[in-house]
């Protein structure tokens, strides 16, 4: 089994390491996906039982769209792994509390697929111009949040793609004064900056800037990545408003602002195509990009049939880099496919999180921290 | 903009206040943008109107409300057509559910109901008009001046009743409706202004996106009373910003449960109990906090809790014909789908859970699960979880520990009902028979608080 899995892993890594922009044909993706499904069906017992309850086996499923998608909530129930969970080298948990107070947990056998996946797509979406920039991180460092997939990801970006990095959030909150000082310095030195963090932390800092009349003319090609939402929080800030405030306070225009959509349960992340389109000088509709190794589909929540073109539905992902857990995950989020002129999906749009669904923990945990701070 | 003459405006402003810019959207006229100016103008108009409103005898106010509500029940009245035609899109409720709200529930706030409420809380309603004899002399009750209300968009009657209570205390109110129901408060205000022009300057209904601190601070300035319905977070955010000297009433998150005794699922009573439970679940799609989210079923009945769950599923399905469910937002369907899938996942793992679902849709869902695992219920959208317990007296309080319980709907024989009610009154503020959970009487004390007594100030005259 291990050998078979390693062989699949190598094929997936080949896909991930392929030249940026190389796409995977639907047929090749399907073959790889079905191999992953067959492996997981054999090696992941809870998943197999879920599949059996739905009468789906590697023998009767011919298309990755037809494999059983586990609800994201299943990650709270049992370890969904193809290996003994105590052998995991990385363990990520959702920080939001679930309906019954349990957190979703994603066990990773090795970091190889995760690292390859996150770095390749980060480069494609945020550094398409080959820039290497100093990082200003509005999130906790991995040493302080060892089970946060976001902090882990930012740590990898720091090590492999950064050119200096400072974290401004710790257990006591956001160090606005330090960030203020460092951004002023970046402005004075004329070095483009990359700001990364949760949307809520950005809002907190923007409020600070408004209160203290602070603005920075960050050098050209500075960029910003935010993540996490506001659904169900006391403050809800629309992406339009955020974009306007980023431009106003940091002098970073919307084409250099990239929103990340990710979840603890998936090894892959999804990014706005804004910077890619800008770099390629193409005008295309706003959308999130999925990496070639992660298929997505939108299903009608009423019937679970594929949603009609551009109709809203539940987002599902088949993430090949989830090789040792479960690749087929159904989110609690509503999205819509964004088609190109020839009808092929270019990407997707996230319309909202299921009401009452837990937002990705990171933004909310920080939200609580920050509101506690201002109280 | 020619078609706008037939579109229903989703706001209401006192006479003399300039109308906001708006755009036609199907059957309604939607406010394009509210700014601080509109709120200041509305505030000023309400304050100017206060002396005149205060001078109206309570009889005039009660009669006006009665006539306005009667108009909403009149099949020939355009106000009724507007509510029922634009309502499904604006509120997310089916026409049938809205008709029930108007014809049965709003009808309770007619003259008879309001006099009963006034007597129940104030003793002598005349105390609102003048000094009346009290134990130590004379006493009168005065309203708190201009109110600011924030609605949650749960059940359409809640907002209307909230505004009615203000009028009964001869005060004025600026209401911020929820985007999930701007229609009812706006239509009620408009209709009332037509039947009784003297009350036209007493109300303002203006919708804006919640969380807009600037607008909300404008609305809060100088308010004599602030009433907020919503999540605990929303309530707290207004509580912090409300004027120090005004009164603040917050109705935060609550949930309700059904308690079904073993006698209530005997062979002969199973069907009626299932019907009552299905009704309470279906009416208003569990959007309000009075609808049951969980049903505790006592073991030892002639029929099992599984049989009750199956019967409830059948009744929920039948109710889709008489009390249809509007197709909800994709977000809501997605949430129900994810709940179901998570429970089905647990079933696949061999846990003792069962699921009944509406075929090919998320219209209704019945879960049956044992109580050996702590749970928090409250998803809405016609999803009911049946939890078997050995004995209701001990089981219900134990399972509700830490939950903000509003109502417990009890299905039991008469004497068992009394005994259970005594026990449950320690954890819930309202105990009622199953089948009436979402339809409280007008004199119900909302979450344990009076409706009018909170909204007046007493003036004593000693002789």
Image (spheres, rainbow, N blue to C red):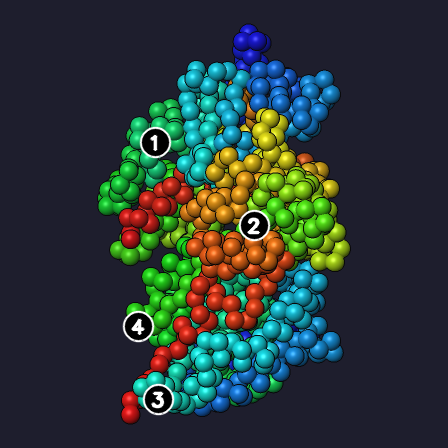
Q: Which is closer to the viewer, label 1 or label 4?
A: 4
| Circle 3 chain | B
Q: Nearer the viewer, mark 4 or mark 2?
A: 2
Q: Residue at x 38, y 26 (%)?
A: A156
- What number is the disc on residue B209? none
Element class at badge 3: strand
Residue furthest front in the image: B415
**SS at mark 4?**
loop
A273 or B207: nearer the eye? B207
Residue A52 location in percent, x, y? 67, 23
Residue B259's disc number = 2
Residue B461, horizontal then vertical, whole percent:
31, 89
Label 1 crowd bin: few (<14), some (14–19), many (20+), radius 10 Å: some
**Looking at the image, is mark 1 or mark 3 nearer the viewer?**
3
Tag 3 or tag 4, which sits nearer the N-term?
A: 3
Q: Are marks 1 and 4 on the same chain?
A: no
The answer for which chain carries disc 1 is A
Disc 3: which residue: B138
Q: Of marks 3 and 2, which one's residue comes earlier in the chain?
A: 3
Q: Residue at x 61, y 40 (%)?
A: B300
Determine if marks 1 and 3 fall on one subunit.
Answer: no
- Which residue bears the numbered disc 4? B245
3D distance between C-alphas at marks 4 and 2: 42 Å
């Amino acid at each position: 089994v291990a050998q078979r899995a390693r062989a699949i892993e190598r094929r997936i890594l080949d896909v991930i390491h392929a030249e940026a922009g190389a796409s995977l044909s639907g047929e090749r993706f399907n073959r790889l996906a079905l191999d992953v499904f067959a492996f997981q069906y054999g090696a992941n017992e809870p998943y197999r039982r879920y599949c059996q309850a739905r009468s789906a086996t590697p023998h009767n499923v011919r298309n990755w769209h037809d494999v059983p998608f586990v609800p994201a909530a299943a990650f709270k129930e049992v370890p969904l792994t193809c290996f003994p969970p105590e052998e995991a080298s990385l363990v990520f948990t959702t920080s939001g509390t679930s309906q019954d107070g349990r957190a979703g947990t994603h066990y990773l056998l090795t970091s190889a697929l995760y690292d390859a996946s996150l770095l390749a797509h980060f480069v494609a979406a945020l550094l398409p111009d080959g820039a290497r920039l100093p990082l200003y991180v509005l999130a906790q460092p991995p040493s302080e949040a060892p089970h946060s997939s976001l902090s882990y990801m930012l740590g990898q970006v720091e090590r492999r793609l950064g050119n200096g990095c400072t974290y401004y959030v710790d257990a006591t909150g956001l160090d606005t004064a330090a960030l203020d000082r460092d951004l002023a310095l970046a402005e004075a030195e004329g070095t483009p900056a990359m700001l990364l963090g949760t949307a809520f932390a950005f809002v907190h800092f923007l409020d600070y800037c408004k209160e203290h009349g602070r603005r920075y003319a960050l050098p050209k090609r500075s960029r910003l990545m935010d993540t996490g939402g506001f659904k169900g929080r006391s403050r809800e800030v629309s992406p339009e408003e955020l974009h306007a405030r980023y431009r106003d306070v940091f002098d970073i225009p919307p084409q250099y602002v990239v929103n990340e959509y990710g979840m603890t349960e998936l090894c892959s992340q999804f990014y706005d195509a804004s910077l890619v389109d800008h770099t390629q000088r193409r005008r295309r509709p706003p959308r999130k990009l999925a990496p070639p190794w992660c298929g997505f589909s939108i299903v009608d929540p009423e019937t679970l049939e594929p949603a009609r073109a551009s109709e809203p539905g539940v987002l599902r992902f088949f993430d090949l880099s989830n090789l040792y857990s479960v690749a087929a995950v159904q989110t609690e989020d509503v999205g819509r496919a964004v088609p190109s002129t020839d009808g092929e999906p270019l990407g997707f749009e996230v319309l909202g999180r299921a009401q009452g669904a837990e937002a990705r923990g990171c933004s909310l945990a920080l939200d609580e921290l920050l509101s506690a701070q201002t109280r | 903009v020619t078609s706008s003459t037939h579109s229903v405006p989703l706001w209401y402003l006192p006479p003399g206040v300039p109308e906001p810019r708006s755009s036609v959207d199907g059957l309604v006229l939607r406010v394009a943008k509210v700014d601080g100016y509109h709120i200041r103008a509305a505030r000023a108009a309400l304050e100017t109107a206060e002396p005149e409103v205060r001078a109206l005898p309570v009889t005039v106010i009660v009669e006006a409300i009665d006539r306005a509500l009667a108009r909403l029940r009149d099949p020939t009245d355009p106000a009724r057509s507007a509510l029922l035609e634009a309502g499904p899109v604006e509120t997310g409720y089916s026409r049938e559910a809205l008709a029930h709200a108007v014809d049965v529930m709003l009808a309770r706030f007619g003259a008879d109901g309001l006099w009963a409420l006034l007597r129940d809380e104030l003793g002598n309603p005349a105390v609102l008009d003048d000094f009346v004899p009290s134990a130590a002399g004379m006493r009168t009750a005065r309203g708190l001046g201009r109110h600011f209300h924030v609605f949650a968009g749960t059940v359409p009657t809640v907002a209307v009743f909230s505004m009615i209570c203000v009028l009964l205390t001869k005060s004025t109110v600026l209401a911020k409706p929820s985007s999930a129901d701007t229609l009812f408060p706006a239509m009620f205000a408009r209709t009332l202004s037509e039947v009784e022009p003297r009350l036209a300057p007493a109300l303002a209904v203006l919708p804006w996106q919640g969380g807009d601190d600037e607008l909300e601070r404008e609305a809060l300035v100088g308010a004599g009373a602030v009433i907020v319905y919503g999540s605990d977070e929303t309530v707290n955010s207004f509580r912090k910003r409300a004027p120090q000297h005004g009164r603040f009433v917050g109705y935060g998150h609550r949930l309700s449960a059904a308690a079904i005794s073993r006698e209530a699922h005997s062979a002969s009573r199973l069907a009626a109990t299932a019907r009552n439970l299905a009704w309470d679940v279906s009416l208003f799609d569990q959007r309000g906090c009075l609808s049951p989210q969980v049903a505790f079923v006592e073991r030892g009945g002639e029929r099992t809790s599984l049989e009750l769950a199956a019967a409830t599923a059948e009744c929920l399905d039948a109710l889709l014909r008489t009390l249809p469910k509007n197709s909800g937002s994709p977000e809501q369907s997605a949430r129900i789908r994810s709940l179901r899938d998570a429970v089905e996942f647990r079933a696949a793992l061999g846990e003792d859970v069962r699921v009944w679902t509406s075929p090919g849709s998320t219209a209704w869902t019945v879960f049956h699960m044992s109580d050996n695992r702590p749970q928090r219920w409250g998803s809405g959208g016609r999803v009911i979880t049946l939890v078997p317990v050995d004995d209701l007296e001990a089981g219900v309080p134990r399972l509700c520990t830490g939950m903000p319980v509003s109502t417990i709907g009890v299905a039991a024989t008469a004497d068992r009902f009394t005994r259970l009610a005594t026990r449950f009154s320690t954890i819930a503020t309202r105990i009622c028979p199953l089948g009436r959970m979402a339809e409280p009487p007008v004199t119900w004390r909302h979450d344990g608080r009076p409706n009018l007594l909170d909204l007046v100030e007493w003036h004593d005259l000693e002789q």
